[in-house]
Amino acid sequence: MFDNLSEKLGGILDRLTGRGALSEADVDAAMREVRRALLEADVSLDVVRDFIERVRAQAIGATVVKSVTPGQMVVKIVHDELVATLGADGEGGLDFNAVPPVAIMMVGLQGSGKTTTTAKLARRLTQRDKKKVLMASLDIYRPAAMEQLAILGRDLDIQTLPIVAGQKPAQIARRAIEAGKLGGYDVVLLDTAGRTTLDEDMMSEAAEIKSVAQPHEVLLVADSLTGQDAVNLARSFDQRVGLTGIVLTRVDGDGRGGAALSMRAVTGKPIKLIGTGEKTDALEDFHPSRIAGRILGMGDVVSLVEKAAAHIDAEKAARTAEKMRKGQFDLADMRDQLMQMSNMGGLSGLMGMMPGIAKMKNQIASAGLDDKVLKRQVAVIDSMTRQERKNPDILKASRKKRIAAGAGLKVEEVNKLLKMHRNMADMMKAMGGKAGKRGPMAGMAQAMGFGGGGPSPEEIKAMTEKLQSGGGLPQLPKDMPTALRNAPGLPGLGSGRPNLPGLGGFPGFGKKK
């Protein structure tokens, strides 16, 4: 969602960091461009004005003048002010500090994604927080709205309130709270009705439901693609119903990001959750500092690590790590790795969190690098026999032709995959060498400057702060594999063609023979 804003701000700030000293005129010129970039991103005029004033006051102050790297100091100031505009870290979590069942009321316009978000939140509370959740649809106007929530509940194995024809929304809310108490539920989610536009009937109905259910949280579900109108929507709901937080949906869309930057500043209500896709697991906590890091192209190392922890099977990873260390990494293991990447959001999702990758966006796009690459590679491996996956060395010309035909691809694609596998196997074995029995992740941790074992949360946080201050990655050891050392676009990793760890260059990046 923030791609355009990220590209423009990145270009403006890059020009500043390339200078040894900054004059007041340099800062003023940069701030004019930043103002234009924010306004084009649909950020509220008042918010832009305040933001620019705060940044300028600090950027022409003594801190920047005395700094060794004034340009990078301005980047840090812009980052900190973006965080302040988006809201303080730690204020966005849902509050369950109340007598169960805790009622959470979802409000918003029709089509903003309330019903889907209700199901996503229910899944999250059930699976991650181990809470007993009851969902209730109060939408008696939209055709099949109640049935939609019931089907989502059945698919996720989460209880929904039985549908009783003829009841009013306030009566359904009262019945849901009573059912929550009798059934011993921890949380009751109330999915209210929306309208295509703000109107008095909707507001009156929402106020009546609130007085009946006494919800502990009132969450506004807002479509991030609506831009400035989302800010007016939030203000109206807050005045009539009283919001406790905001959920932004369709953050994975091509919106300009202005709603996210404006809503927190205008309403004073924290953005608590963001919807990042259509699937029911695509709901994330909103972390202002991480979003600010993504906007400025600094990446989001912490979210990347959290996503890995949530999607990677620890036992399978340990077995694969041991095989890698011994150099026994076969194509079946590689298929597992590719599937895990796909589950974690695919190439685009993962690369968006990596520091410096934003600056390579055009190069990546021209190379045709997208999530279809993973699917094609999995298709190639699926076309092989079990013996071929275990021992890729037996793959000669005739076998490669058969595999390519089975996957609907050319033989060149099969060769690329085999070369990629060979590079991964060689590098993982090299990384596992010094790390000994601790496996390749210990080697990776050592290469990143963490000593032995995997990085702790404190070390991850320290690395993120170093990236955000423009310090780049920790100093790389002299004996680090060349494949890792020659990755461009990543701070502190030198230059050369793109060559991410173990992948030997993504397909399409390598030199053509």
Image: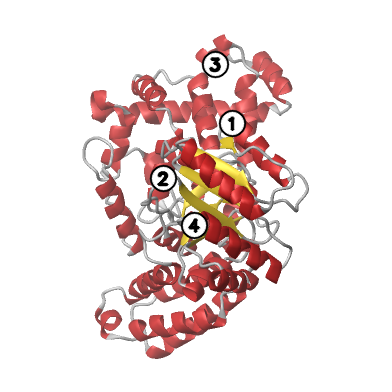
Residue 84 visible in rendering: yes
Indicate left or right for 141 with 1 as reference: right
**Chain-order first, disc 4 or disc 1:** 4
How many angstroms separate mark 3 from mark 2 (CA)? 53 Å
Which structural element holds mark 1? helix
Report the mark closest to the observer, 2 or 1.
2
Circles 4 and 2: CB atoms closer than 8 Å: no
**Which mark is drawn over residue 214?**
4
Left or right, 491 with respect to 119, comes to left
Dot 3 corresponds to which residue? Answer: 389
Q: Residue at x 61, y 68 (%)?
A: 230
Distance in Å between CA atoms under marks 4 and 3: 59 Å
Q: Locate residue 237, reporting x and y percent.
A: 58, 69
Between disc 2 and disc 1, whose residue precedes?
2
Quick one: SS at disc 2? Answer: loop
Of residue 452 and residue 401, the one placed in the foreground of this image is 452
- Mark 2 packing: few (<14 Cα in 10 Å), some, or many (20+)? some
